[in-house]
Amino acid sequence: MKQLAADLGIADRVTFTGLVPPGSVPDHLARATVLVLPNPASAISTRFTSPLKLFEYMAAHRAIVASDLPSIQEVLKDGEHALLVAPGDPSALAAALRKLAGDRKLGERLAQAAFAESSRYTWGRRAERLEALFKDVLAA
């Protein structure tokens, strides 16, 4: 990847961090203008995942471009909270990034909407929903 970045003449604009301690992740996300979640259309990514990285992105208050998958659609709406693109389509991903680069107000609006929605996906909220589910099951 480093060689590809050099070959494309963008090495000075790309940072390869390697492993980042969890406590440093928010600082790295805060440096970005757009955060990208290009999940593939695999069985796990499509239906059976809780996109924890997505929740971090939402809380980072940054514009998001993500794969248009059911697991992502449960959280984000295209054009409202993020730009959703066809999984595995680099042209669609590039087009969404260009769109955000050319329309900062759109990026700000999407970031604000995703950030506002992020409070629904905290560990505390998850615990509340699980507790309610367990109570319902036990009462049945």
Image (cartoon, rainbow, N blue to C red):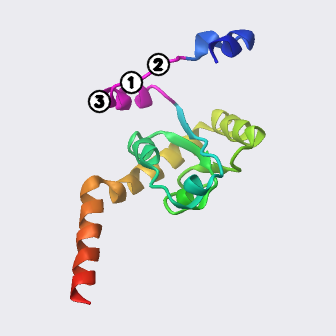
- The residue carrying mark 3 is 23
Residue ID for mark 2: 17
The magenta stretch is 15-32
Which residue bears the numbered disc 1?
Answer: 20
The x, y position of residue 131, in whole percent, is 23, 70
Q: Pick whichever, 73 or 33, lies toward us.
A: 73
Farthest residue, direction right: 91
Dot 2 amino acid type? Thr
Report the residue at 33% width, 31% height from top.
22
Task: Say which quarter of the image contains residue 5.
Answer: top right
Whole-number angstrom distance, CA of label 2 to CA of label 3: 14 Å
Quadrant where the image shows the C terminus: bottom left
Pointer 3 local density, CA inside 10 Å: few below 14, some 14–19, many at least 20 = few
Task: Tell me the SS state at disc 1.
Answer: loop
Residue 114 vs 128, above or below: the answer is above
The span from disc 1 to disc 2 (Cα, nearest Å) is 7 Å
Residue type (three-letter) at the residue carrying disc 1: Val
